[in-house]
Image (cartoon, rainbow, N blue to C red):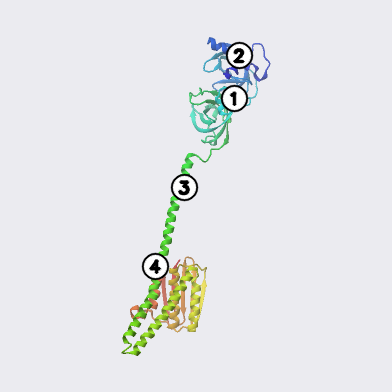
Amino acid sequence: MAVAAALGVCAAAGLAQTDGVQNLQSIEAAIQKARSTKTPVPVVVRGIVILNHELLVIEDRTGATEVQMATPAPTALGDEVEVTGRMTVSQRSRIEDGRLRRLWNGSMPLPLAITPDEAAEGENDLFLVQTDARLLSAEPAGLTGVELNLTGGHQNFSAILPGDSADGDLPRRLMQPGSTLRVTGVLFVSGDLTGNYGDSFTLRLRSPDDLELVEGPSWWTREHVLLLAGLFAIVVLIGVQLNARSRHARYRAVAEERANISRDIHDTLAQGFAGITLQLQAAEQTLDRDPRRAQAYLQEALHLVRHSRNESHLSVEILRAASRSERLDALIARCIAQLQVDSGSAIEQQITGEPVPLSYHLLNHCFRIVQEGIANAVRHAQATRISVRVCYEPRRLRLEVEDNGLGFDPGSIPGPDRGSFGLTGMRERAAAIHSDFHLESSPTGTLIRVMVAL
């Protein structure tokens, strides 16, 4: 192996050879002799200390070797030393029974930048190397050490930081699985430090400074993708549900609007046509024997025709106003203009607040209530001044019709069974839109107030 060839540390740091220090060729010869005879061979080598925790590894520009000391000797990383011992070959070649002589303080050699695939080839065994890899997991090693499981290229490997070199917990940003780390350490091919022979190699670190964060973990982890998929599915389901509810609400609104229109037609045109039919039938039956009475029936039928025509025009006008999102006060203004010409009364309209569009249902009932209130003031109260107030309030619409007419006793007004439909109709319309109907009347005038929730 090139690791064995690298034992030519006699040229360490470019030093001149001295008596007794073997050169590269003699070291290789010693390795070959140790292999063939299976007996240790004496050697003297020089190098720089690159690992001094549990194991002692020295390196020069041509190679590196592991040293097993006969007696402990204090060394520091970067020290240049001379080692005397016996070269042996087991799983890898090393110097046993080493005796160390410290020459002087030096500096750490620059690490060899290689890829994980190059590290697994074995040519740089025991060298100080540097490589980039992605962190898979971090596990305890020894009492307080840390073992990092990494992957890079086509290789899985581990990096071990001894406990007494860790100086406490490593920064959390370095321990996030998926992070890309730049790892500097002594390379041990085949992972014999941990017994984990499934790894291509192992890097032995000296301190936490041998770890550098290159890039944080990608957000697109399997867990996050599954979370996003789940959230997307929930959002889709909510969207489908909301769309179904929206369509159902639109269909229901259309159905309710159609029901309101049909009910309005029934209460106006259909009732008018029924009255006309009855009057014409009565006129037909009395025409021969009582022409005067038949004429009265015809006059009443003619009156009902005119009334029904006006009602149909009004219903069409309300439908058009609703489709154009026309405001209630605009409809009331046209009604006031028509009644003012016919009656000669002074009718004024007051509008306050910010106008809002109303549905056909609200627009129809509110307008009919105001119309009936103005008509009653003109026809029955002999009022000379009528005030109509349309007040748009927050979440509420307030309608008021006030006159200075003769007034009346609300309790004395006959019900619809006795031919009076105006007041009863206003109350029924107010109930249909769930509004509050209030009536005040005295000899000096009448006030009708309707409060509609928006």
Upstream in sequence: badge 4 or badge 1: 1
Q: Which residue is under mark 2? A: 27
Work out whether residue 438 can be spotted: yes
Q: How far is the residue under mark 2 from the one under mark 1? A: 21 Å
| Mark nearer the viewer, 3 or 1 | 3
Residue 433 drawn above or below residue 115: below
Q: How far is the residue under mark 3 from the one under mark 4? A: 40 Å
Residue 213 drawn above or below residue 357: above
What is the quadrant of the C terminus in the image? bottom left
Q: How far is the residue under mark 3 from the one under mark 1? A: 49 Å
Q: Amino acid at mark 1?
A: Leu
Q: How far is the residue under mark 4 from the one under mark 2? A: 107 Å
| Mark nearer the viewer, 4 or 1 | 4
Marks 4 and 2 in Cβ contact (< 8 Å) = no
Upstream in sequence: badge 4 or badge 2: 2
Residue at (48% x, 26% y) in the render: 198
Upstream in sequence: badge 3 or badge 4: 3
Q: Which residue is under mark 1? A: 128
